[in-house]
Image (cartoon, helix red, strand yellow):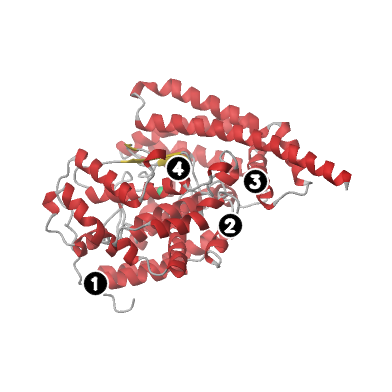
Amino acid sequence: MATDQAQSEQHEETYEQFEERITRISNVGNAAGILRWDQEVVMPEEGTPARAQQLSALSSISHELLTADETGDLLEELESSDLEDEQQAAVREVRRQYDRETSVPQELVEEISETTANAHPTWKQAKEEDDFEQFAPTLEKLVELKREYAEHIDPDADPYAVLFADYEPYLDLETAERVLERLREELVPLIDAIQDSDVDLATDTFAGEFDDADQEALARDVLDALGYDWGRGRLDTAPHPFSSGTQFDARVTTRFEEDDLLGSLTSTIHEFGHANYTLGLPDEAYGTPLGDSRDLTVHESQSRLWENHVGRSQPFWGQFLPTVADRFPELEDATPEEAYEAANQVYDDNLIRVEADELTYHLHIVIRFEIERDLISGDLDVEDVPEAWNDKYEEYLGVRPETDAEGCLQDIHWSHGSFGYFPTYSLGSVLAAQLYDAAEDELGELDDDIRAGEFGDLNGWLRENIHQHGARYTTPDLVEEATGEAYTADYFLEYVKSKYGELYELDDY
Ligand code: ZN
């Protein structure tokens, strides 16, 4: 008995040391996050050389702390002790990061980081000049380096699966592949049917020019309406909107374009979803995996749930359109139905992912997924990417890009060396539909709440079932806990078929 107690006190002490260490690592990372936010939002143009050094210094401090022998010893000791469930979960998360970071040689990490730093301007220029040849050698190099990186982490695994796990560690690649294949199989005919439909939606409801300052006021209105906590957040502009931070300070950025009021509004709601997730993480677990968000699939499920299931819904436009008309009197005569239609039109000629509608969006993702998977496996050569890209656009979306700038050069991700990131966008949308359905199962239909501008019940459900758990559960377990079911695309497909079947009066949907 006495020995047991002594042993358990020893474990407690070890766990405290472990917690202290991982909190320090997390603080270094969060400080880097603020520097990155500053760089995107307010840093003067010439600040880059110093900022790059600051970020690189923080990144090596964090790497050294994580991969130090002390961390390894603490993990080993804790893994052989009798831990509570939550402690076990924290150890599991740190073990995973530790194993990944210690298996990749530091020179390779530095080479990747240097190559991506240089890749960014190369990609940008290639895109501006519509010249894939300029970017091809860099892309080739990044593919090689990332293959090597994957090989160090797990020489026996499919390298693309290893890379994918950087963004979504717990839904395996087979699941992702199955879901994306199903999206392709079921969305292509649905989009074809929409293109054959005679229904003309009110697409020009938001046509016009809208002042930036008024758009910003409206963005603040929508954040107010959704319940954003201004005591722990703020709104700024950035060329590529994002949100970042911690449960104490989760910031939103957006962008305003004179002729795209709707785009700015939906992007603000999207980023609200991300920030709102972060704000729902438990305060008391700050600095540990239990106070940190699950990975990209779950994060994106939160942004898509607010953007699509709330922000693109009929009741939302019934509720929010008067606020829009207050800011923009020229929209006074628009009806909620027209606003709803405009927010949900399906484009028949869009080539650009970030401008895509809720439906065709996923084919943009499927295309990137198929191409990057083949690139990493070696089934596709870099020089053949533009043609493969264009062929797939023609096959899945019925449009063929005329330039690489509007084709395979449009997105920044590959220049970051981010292969395996794209699928999480679609996987997140799929999860959003599953969660929304589960929330309605428990709370009843949410249309009336949304029509009344009441989001407390929905948010409460998300807090309880997703946010408060941090990274305690793996993604599949979290989905199971929240919905009582395994991760599935059923709800998403049901949702889009019923919504778009109705909008476009499709007989078979
Ligand atoms: Zn997002």
**Residue at left 40%, top 52%?**
303
Q: Is residue 115 above or below residue 50?
A: below
The CA span between labels 4 and 2 is 21 Å
Q: Earlier in the sequence, mark 3 or mark 4?
A: 3
Circle 1 is placed at which residue position?
197
Amino acid, disc 3: Ala
Circle 3 is placed at which residue position?
90
The CA span between labels 3 and 2 is 20 Å
Locate the C terminus by quadrant.
bottom left
Q: Earlier in the sequence, mark 1 or mark 2?
A: 2
Query: Which mark is nearer the camera, 3 or 4?
Result: 3
Amino acid, disc 2: Asp
Q: Earlier in the sequence, mark 3 or mark 1?
A: 3
Q: Is residue 426 above or below residue 26?
A: below
Circle 4 is placed at which residue position?
414
Amino acid, disc 4: Trp
Q: Which of the numbered marks, if any, corresponds to residue 172?
A: 2
Image quarter of residue 18: top right
Image quarter of residue 130: top left
Question: Is residue 231 something one can see in this rendering?
Answer: yes
Q: Pointer 3 and pointer 4: residues touching (CB < 8 Å)?
A: no
**Residue at left 88%, top 48%?**
1
